[in-house]
């Protein structure tokens, strides 16, 4: 199916799901969607925005595959995939074909959701005052989040201090309503995509309230700062990363949970969740549960090599368990609930670790010292506290970050920004970049393929 038809169908689905039973429900999906018909008043626009959240939380995006794809690409000897599906096996073995349907679904669903958000932003004149600011801020924030994931997966790594003219992903900022040659958008440079990400996230931070007035689990200004801290850290902009993380910490809107286990498998957001995707029986199971839990497929086998990285008495070890079916295989217990729970996307613990790393690299103590920030994380998991700043180095900070955030989708991106290896592969190896999906190359002659994959070379 032509991807543009999918984009248009996604907007139609959003309206069908979230608009009341009026004349809009009688509109048949067509090759072009009349914006005047679809977005006629403020309530329509707000309803379509909810469709954006639905897309953001789909299994192909933050319902699991954004995070799992990153972890699978980062996998070396610490965990393996024992399932029967070939698509995730290709990813974890770094032997990906450009017709991998899981990757194609992530690309497609990402641009479907971007199109929904672009439609929302095209109709902001139908809104007034605080409503307009909130809706624009939420749409911009979600769009920035999606482009951040996409450029890190499909573009070669961002290199701090370099031009970064390497191909990123198509940058589409207006609604796709017609199938024509103008819709064939080429890949923007990595630099251009990051410029747009920073614009969207910064605007969102300044437009949104610290707490969302409609739903507490919708995005807000603090979510924007948390994502901005990730973006700046990825770009080696340590002062900016620290300041955004510190803004979240010092807001005092979030607190670490008493124990590490308290963070996961909860029926609602905890005080530690800056942003989490809501999951319900209606939405279906999250992808993490499907692949990680022994109660489902149980396809992710944790190795002793990974367990050996933890210090003795680290409470994070308590979340691993033996699969009862074979009495041998070790599973991660972060994702053991199928429905009626949330998928953690950004936690307060990450903000402490970001501020600690940034201050350590800068030789500064803005907000707090790296010593104190690291001890916040170590104290919670029953580890000995550092006494002096000389008790740890950058490797210790990065190890703490890895073990705290393991199986949450951060590892690959941390490896790339710190220029480390995945087994024998260097951080910038072509095999650690995803291929542009085959069907996208087939329908858009303006696209070019990443190195080492089949298709028109860039």
Image (cartoon, grey):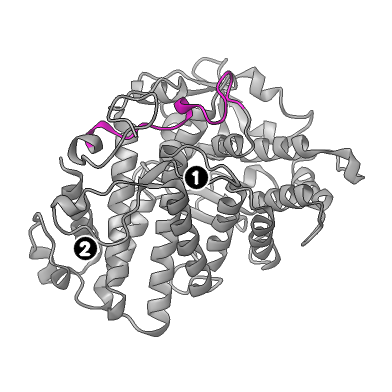
Tell me if residue 34 is in the magenta stretch. no
10 Å neighbourhood of mark 2: few (<14), some, or many (≥20)?
Answer: many
Q: Quadrant of the N terminus?
A: top left
Q: Residue placed at 34% from the left, 44% from the top?
A: 284
How far across and down, in percent of the image, does residue 210 sit?
A: 56, 71
| Magenta segment boundaries in residue numbering | 421-439
Q: Identify which residue, 107 or 11, lies in the foreground.
A: 107
In the picture, the quarter occupied by the C terminus is top left
x and y, in percent, of residue 267 in the image = 50, 51
Bin the neighbour count of mark 1 within 10 Å (Cα to Cα): few under 14, some 14-19, many 20 and up.
some
| Residue depicted at x 67% and y 68% | 251
Which is nearer the N-term, disc 1 or disc 2? 2
State the residue position of label 1: 164
The residue where tag 2 is placed is 15
In the depicted structure, whether residue 121 falls above or below residue 142: below
Residue 77 is left or right of residue 143, and the answer is right
Is residue 387 placed above or below 226 in the rendered structure?
above
Residue 424 belongs to the span the image colors magenta: yes
Query: Can residue 152 be seen in the rendering of this structure?
Result: yes
Query: Position of 149 compared to 17: left or right?
Result: right
Q: Residue at x 33, y 63 (%)?
A: 50
The picture quadrant where one finds residue 436 is top left
Secondary structure beneath disc 2?
helix
Between the residue at mark 1 and the residue at mark 2, the CA separation in whole angstroms equals: 38 Å
Which one is in front, 417 or 288?
417
In the image, what residue occupies the spot 29% across and 34% down?
437
For numbered disc 1, what is the local secondary structure?
Answer: loop
Quarter of the image for residue 132 reads bottom left
Residue 275: give x, y in percent of width and height.
52, 56
């Amino acid at each position: 199916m032509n991807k543009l038809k999918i984009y248009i169908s996604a907007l139609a689905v959003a309206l069908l799901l979230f608009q009341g039973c009026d004349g809009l429900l009688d509109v048949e999906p067509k090759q072009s969607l009349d914006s005047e018909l679809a977005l006629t008043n403020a309530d329509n626009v707000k309803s379509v925005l909810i469709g954006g959240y639905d897309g953001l939380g789909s299994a192909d995006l933050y319902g699991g595959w954004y995070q799992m794809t990153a972890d699978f690409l980062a996998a070396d000897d610490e965990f393996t995939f024992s399932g029967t599906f070939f698509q995730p096996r290709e990813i974890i073995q770094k032997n990906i074909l450009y017709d991998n349907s899981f990757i194609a679904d992530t690309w497609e669903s990402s641009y479907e959701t971007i199109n929904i958000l672009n439609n929302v932003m095209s109709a902001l004149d139908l809104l007034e005052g605080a409503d307009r600011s909130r809706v624009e801020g939420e749409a911009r924030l979600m769009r920035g989040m999606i482009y951040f994931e996409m450029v890190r997966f499909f573009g070669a790594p961002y290199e701090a201090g370099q031009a970064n003219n390497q191909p990123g992903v198509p940058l589409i900022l207006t609604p796709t309503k017609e199938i024509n040659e103008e819709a064939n958008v080429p890949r923007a440079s990595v630099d251009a995509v990051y410029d747009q990400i920073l614009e969207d996230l910064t605007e969102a931070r300044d437009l949104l309230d610290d707490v969302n007035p409609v739903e507490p689990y919708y995005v807000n200004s603090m979510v924007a700062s948390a994502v901005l801290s990730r973006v700046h850290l990825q770009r080696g902009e340590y002062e900016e990363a620290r300041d955004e993380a510190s803004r979240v910490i010092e807001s005092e809107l979030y607190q670490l949970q008493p124990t590490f286990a308290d963070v996961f498998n909860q029926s609602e957001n905890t005080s530690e969740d800056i942003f989490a995707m809501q999951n319900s029986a209606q939405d279906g199971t999250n992808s993490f549960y499907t692949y990680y839990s022994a109660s489902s497929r149980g396809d992710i086998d944790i190795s002793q090599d990974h367990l050996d990285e933890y210090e003795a008495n680290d409470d994070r070890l308590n979340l691993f368990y033996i699969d009862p079916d074979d009495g041998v295989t070790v599973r991660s217990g972060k994702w053991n609930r199928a429905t009626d729970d949330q998928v953690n996307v950004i936690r307060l613990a990450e903000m402490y670790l970001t501020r600690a790393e940034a201050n350590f690299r800068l030789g500064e103590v803005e907000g707090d010292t790296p010593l104190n920030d690291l001890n916040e994380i170590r104290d919670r998991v029953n580890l000995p506290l550092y006494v002096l700043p000389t008790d740890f180095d950058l490797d210790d900070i990065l190890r703490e970050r890895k073990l705290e955030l393991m199986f949450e989708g951060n590892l690959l991106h941390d490896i790339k920004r710190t220029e480390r290896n995945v087994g024998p592969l260097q951080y910038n190896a072509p095999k650690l970049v995803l291929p542009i999906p085959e069907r996208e190359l087939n329908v858009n002659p303006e696209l070019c393929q990443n190195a080492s994959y089949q298709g028109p070379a860039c």
